[in-house]
Each structure stands twice: as C-alpha cells, then as structure tokens.
Amino acid sequence: MAFKKDLKRKSPMTDDYGTSLEEAFKNGMEGTTAHYQAILFMYKQLHDALIKKHAEELEVARVQGKLELFDELFNMSALGEEKEKIESELTFEEEVGFLNWKRK
C-alpha cells in the first residue's frame, strides 16, 4: 500500500535509491550476467578437472598394463628357463640311464 507521501513524489524509486529505472535495469542485468558467468566459470573448471582426472586415470591404467605385461613376460621367461633346466636334466638322466643300460 502506498503512503500519501509516496503518491506526491514523481519517482519514489529514484528518490529513495538514487537511480532511474533504466539504471536499475542495467545494474540488474549486469548482476545477472555476472552471476551466470560465475556459474559457467565454475562448470568450466569442473569440466577441465574431470578431463585432467580422466587423462591421469588413463595414464595410470597404461602404466599398470605395462607392468602386468612385464610381469607376464618375466614369468614366461622364468618358465622358459625352468623348462630348459628340466629338459636338460631329462636329457642328462636319459644319457646316464643309457650309459648305465649299456654297462649292464
């Protein structure tokens, strides 16, 4: 409800706040624009952080894959060496057995 004093004024908002309606609208638009720019900036920062995190996770997965591959290759080479040892023992036992068989 308006007071009688307000009805006598030409523009009560200008008298009370010291700005015209155009300036108030302009200030409101600038404030709104700044608010949404801040929100967009936060989302951009979040998006960039997610991209960096994803890239780091890919790098970690790549390194872990290499380590697993090296472990498998190492185990295969160790198994290959063990296989060679067993084969050499078998051939040695066969030769010794053959020699013992010849002696009998």
Image (cartoon, helix red, strand yellow):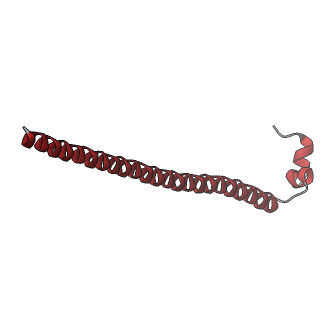
> In the figure, residue 11 lies in which quadrant?
bottom right
Q: Is residue 68 left or right of residue 39?
A: left
| Residue at 66% from the left image edge and 57% from the top image edge | 41
| Residue at 45% from the left image edge and 54% from the top image edge | 62
Q: For this rendering, which residue is in front, 30 or 18?
A: 30
User: Which quadrant would the N terminus be assigned to in this image?
Assistant: top right
Task: Please provide percent x and percent y for residue 31.
Answer: 75, 56
Task: Please provide percent x and percent y for residue 97.
Answer: 13, 40
> In the figure, residue 101 lies in which quadrant?
top left
Q: Is residue 38 left or right of residue 96?
A: right
> In the figure, residue 30 lies in which quadrant?
bottom right
| Residue at 35% from the left image edge and 47% from the top image edge | 78
Q: For this rendering, which residue is in front, 77 or 54?
A: 77
Residue occupying the far front of the picture? 103
Q: Judge whether 90 appears above or below 70 on screen.
A: above
Q: Total number of numbered labels?
A: 0
Q: Judge whether 81 appears above or below 21 on screen.
A: above
Task: Please provide percent x and percent y for residue 13.
Answer: 86, 51
